[in-house]
Image (cartoon, rainbow, N blue to C red):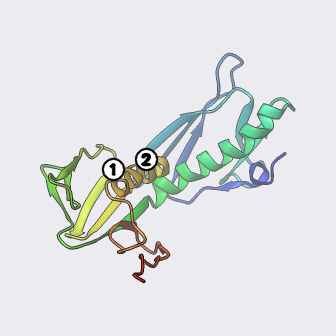
Amino acid sequence: MSRIGKQEIGIPENVNVVVSPKTNLDGQAIFIEGPKGRLYRILHSLICCNFDEKTPKKLVITRVEDTKQAQELCGLSRTLIANMVTGVAVGFEKRLQIVGVGYRAQLEKGNLSINAGYSHPVKKITPNVLGVIVESPTSIVVSGIQKDMVGEFAAKLRNVRPAEPYKGKGIFYEGEFIKRKAGKTRK
């Protein structure tokens, strides 16, 4: 069994978890509700999720069969459920910085408009489940309860103008370090 799959998932006090009974035909459903919202996921039929017998505020992931696929899914399922619990309890956020002369972002009718050195502003439609805040014209915060959606949307925003190593312009994650390169030198 994977090392990650063996770990228990702690459930905070303000989070409610409902695990449906196991059926043979389809996977087991798990519903998680907290102060930030609610999420659900249907687990693969090779994986089973139950509450720990010793402490009821912990979830344990087990395998139904001892196959390679079940072993692979065990750690993945544990990580996905742990991210769901964290998302409904605390939430996730990614911060982006825009660096460059004339580079800026603004919200227009709930959608993001980014001027990043192109002849036209790049418009990005923000998903309903995510919150996008423009703190300043050069600072964007993407937040939500689903870690994968927050990371994917932040990556799409970064790909509008990826950070370039020669002049140091572009869209960066906060705290990201881009190693600067020297330009061509004349002889």
Among the 4 quarters of the image, the one containing residue 184: bottom left
Q: What element carries label 1?
A: loop
Which residue, given by chain and number where applicable, does mark 1 sit on?
A: 130
Instruction: Classify residue 149 as left or right of residue 75.
Output: left
Separation (CA) of disc 1 from disc 2: 8 Å
Q: Which of 122 and 165 is in front in this view?
A: 165
Please name whichever residue, 182 or 93, is drawn nearer the observer in this view of the structure.
182
Mark 2: give few (<14), some (14-19) or many (20+) Cα within 10 Å: some
Q: Are marks 1 and 2 in contact (CB under 8 Å)?
A: yes
User: Measured from the top left, where is residue 170 in percent x and y?
Assistant: 33, 66
Residue 49 — which label? Answer: none
Q: Residue at x 75, y 39 (%)?
A: 72
Q: Extreme left residue here? A: 109
Q: Can residue 63 be seen in this view?
A: no
Q: What element carries label 2?
A: helix
Q: Quadrant of the N terminus?
A: top right
Side of 85 relative to 132 (left or right): right
Question: Residue at position x 41%, y 72% from top?
Answer: 174
Reading the chain from its start, which is encountered first: label 1 or label 2? Answer: 1
In the rendered image, which quarter contains the C terminus?
bottom left
**Amino acid of disc 2:** Met
Q: Which residue is drawn at 16% across and 53% down?
A: 121
Q: Kindly give the residue lying farthest to the right in the view shown.
A: 66
Q: Mark 2 points at which residue?
A: 149
Image side of residue 132 versus residue 31, left or right:
left
